[in-house]
Amino acid sequence: MIRARFGLGVAVGVALAVAAAGACAPRKGSPVARGPRLLKLEAFPGAVVERACVPTGPEQCFNARDDNCNGIIDEGCGVNTGLVQFAAAWTEPKADVDLRVVDPNGELVEAGRATQAGLVKDRDCPGKRNECRGQNMENVYLEAGDPVRGKYQLRIRLEDLGGETPPIRVTVGARVGPKTYALEVTLEQAGDERALTLEL
Ligand SMILES: [Ca+2]
Ligand SMILES: [Ca+2]
């Protein structure tokens, strides 16, 4: 866990250089060498980014966390995943939170169609007809193949409290290749948002 401290009102992100994982360099041409890797993560001031996965037991569904630390978020829950995945989960059933992801080509990832970089959004919660059934998790994932390298910009925004009592605590999970990352976001009122950037 890395704790970043900032002066009040300083609107600068934290740049966390991500050290190369493992002491052994993968052989050239091996699947590990070809897989995507997180080069940099810039989070909003005060963000606490969990970079080392700590197993807490069997995988739990719709919490945007890799509970069993196998490198996949919410597997076995009917949630799509790929070599790149971003998820945001919250517990208040009526609160409307949006996970907005802009891929390295500058394209916003939307439900129902893949961006040119191959990203799709497959859950929009709570949904107009409560499709998420109280299990609020929005999920963006790479449909197939190798991801486009560059900056992935994430925004977590509270659209509507929906009558729920603030704060709304949102867990944000990210998968890049075989590794997962997590951080918590607290949103108080409609329009509140936090941003982070992951560079591959
Ligand atoms: Ca897992
Ligand atoms: Ca989980």
Image: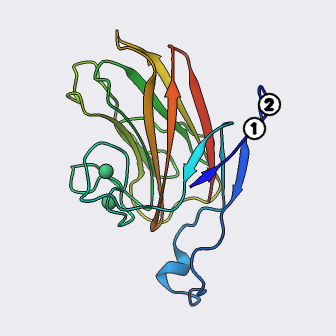
Residue at x 66%, y 62% (from the top left corner):
39
Quadrant of the rendering where the N terminus is positioned = bottom right
Question: According to the image, what is the colour scheme of the structure?
Answer: rainbow
Q: Give the image location of residue 28, x and y in percent.
A: 59, 89
Q: Mark 1 sits on what residue?
A: 6
Q: Mark 2 sits on what residue?
A: 10
Three-letter code, disc 2: Val
Quadrant of the rendering where the C terminus is positioned = bottom right
Is disc 1 surrounded by few (<14), some (14 to 19) or many (20+) residues within 10 Å? some
**Does 8 sit left or right of 106 as displayed?**
right
> Is mark 1 in CB contact (under 8 Å) with mark 2?
yes
Q: Is mark 2 within 8 Å of ligand 2?
A: no
User: Is disc 2 placed on a helix, strand or loop?
Assistant: loop
Three-letter code, disc 1: Phe
Residue at x 21%, y 50% (from the top left corner):
77
Q: Is residue 56 above or below residue 132?
A: below
Q: Residue furthest bottom?
A: 27
